Amino acid sequence: MNNRRVKVHKVGGIFEYTAWKNLRVGNIVKVEKDEFFPADLLLLSSSYEDAVCYVETMNLDGETNLKLKQGLEVTSSLQEDLNIQKFKATVKCEDPNANLYSFVGSMEFEGKNYALSPQQLLLRDSKLRNTDYIFGAVIFTGHDTKVIQNSTDPPSKRSRIEKKMDKVIYFLFCILFLMAFVGSFFFGIATKDDFQNGLMKRWYLRPDDSTVFFDPKRPAAAALFHCLTALMLYGFFIPISLYVSIEMVKVLQSVFINQDIHMYYKEADKPARARTSNLNEELGQVDTILSDKTGTLTCNSMEFIKCSIAGVAYGCGATEVEKVMGRRKGSPPIREHDIESEAHNIRGSLDKKTLIKGFNFDDERIRDGHWVNEPHADVIQKFFRVLAVCHTAIPEVNEDTGNVSYEAESPDEAAFLIAARELGFEFYRRGQTSLSTFELDPVSGNKVERLVVAFKLSNCFVYVITLQFDCYSYILSLHNDMKSFSLVTL
């Protein structure tokens, strides 16, 4: 990892590639989109005008949603490589520590001090997303970075059988050494008494004219060489081949797992795949489950199935619970719709379209722009327009296909956005002060672009706090005053 390369400012606004291990505190680096941060960086500026960037911290905390980071306003103008050569500042901050979510420091720039917070800190092993590039100053490197300070030794992944085998082998080694030591001890005593007063007890060994192995004058050396000989002769006592046999069994077990038809996942068209054979004997032997939230052990998937607009219920989809209950009772789940709506649902299921993750909504009164014929068409339009703009998600447009996917903080937001997109209200771009959507014009059938502008009064942004669906009004906050505004579209 430390041999990865990153752009570092050398001199005169020129950036050159260098390895991560060569970074030093105070270097100015340029990290581009989808690259990892090589060290703990102080965010100076980005490709956006107000020095914001989006960071993925999946390697740190396992969360896939993007986090917003923003640099100081005084450094936000450093958007070109040549501007970096004139940048000089002094940063004073805390000592290296393991806390990922705190950072205290200050930056002295042009004779003024500016406070620093975790909002300006980019941690090593995070990835830059949805931002073309950023400029950052190296604060901590190597073992001083927060992720390394926070890391622990990896736990052992050896199975119980392997650990028990190790104990058995250690025990047999002890028995082997004990046998060799005891035998050599008595062999040394016997060798010492072989030749006394001209009499030879073991005459066949010729103790009067023997080598060091049977020399009565050097019994200690003879005992030592006898011990080494015994270790080699009794070596078969250690079942080394047992490890090889067990590894062969594990490999065969992994082959059986890959070919097991009962472990095939039909919905995703994925068979079982054993990527390693180390823990075969541990499969299914769950001892303890530790969970911090429900999403850890569940799919945590959200689907847009039904909605209520102006007191009218829309949607003919069914939840998984309803489907299971219907199958148990041998009949389809009960739906709260009239006969005509149910007939539409049956006809729609015959020519069912491609399933879309997070979208299970089907109602002919809403689909394909038919909502304009409803009594409260204006409320329906505002309802789905709100779903398309009232969120914190980030769109990602596939340049090849033009399809839009969303990076949301929760699956709820993603389901709302997908529902709005499928019903003709597609959110496709987020700016720093505006949101852009495509709305389906029910008259012409074409997509019309809409721009939702954020207000900025007296150098203070107006933020959306909550939403009232019945009268369709935003409740906005400006300092401590609460005022009501309607949605502004251009």
Image: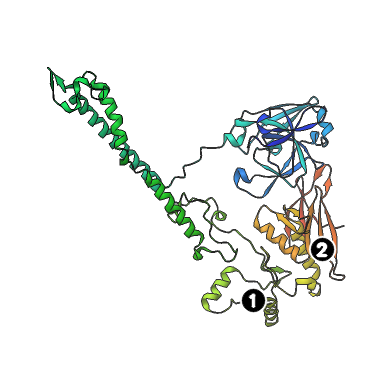
Identify the residue at horizontal 67%, vertical 82% (top origin). 339
The quarter of the picture where the N terminus appears is top right
Quadrant of res 97: top right
Q: Residues within 10 Å of mark 2 (few under 14, many from 20)?
A: many
- Work out whether residue 85 or residue 4 is closer to the camera in this orientation and state it: 4
Dot 1 corresponds to which residue? 336
Residue 124 image position (x, y, % from top left): 65, 37
Q: Is residue 160 visible?
A: no
As drawn, is 420 to the left or to the right of 150? Answer: right
- The type of residue carrying mark 1 is Glu
Element under label 1?
Answer: loop
The quarter of the picture where the C terminus appears is bottom right
Q: Earlier in the sequence, mark 2 or mark 1?
A: 1
Quadrant of res 212: top left
**Residue at mark 2 to residue at mark 1: CA–CA distance:** 29 Å
Q: Is residue 381 above or below residue 133?
A: below
- Work out whether residue 301 or residue 258 is closer to the camera in this orientation and state it: 258
Q: Is residue 77 above or below residue 188?
A: below
Q: Which of pointers 2 and 1 indicates the residue nearer the eye?
A: 2
Residue 476 image position (x, y, % from top left): 77, 52
The dot on residue 435 is none
Residue 420 image position (x, y, % from top left): 74, 63
- The type of residue carrying mark 2 is Glu
Residue 3 image position (x, y, % from top left): 65, 35
- Work out whether residue 390 or residue 428 is closer to the camera in this orientation and state it: 428
Element under label 2?
Answer: strand
Identify the residue at horizontal 76%, vertical 67% (top origin). 423
The dot on residue 439 is 2
- Work out whether residue 371 or residue 247 is closer to the camera in this orientation and state it: 247
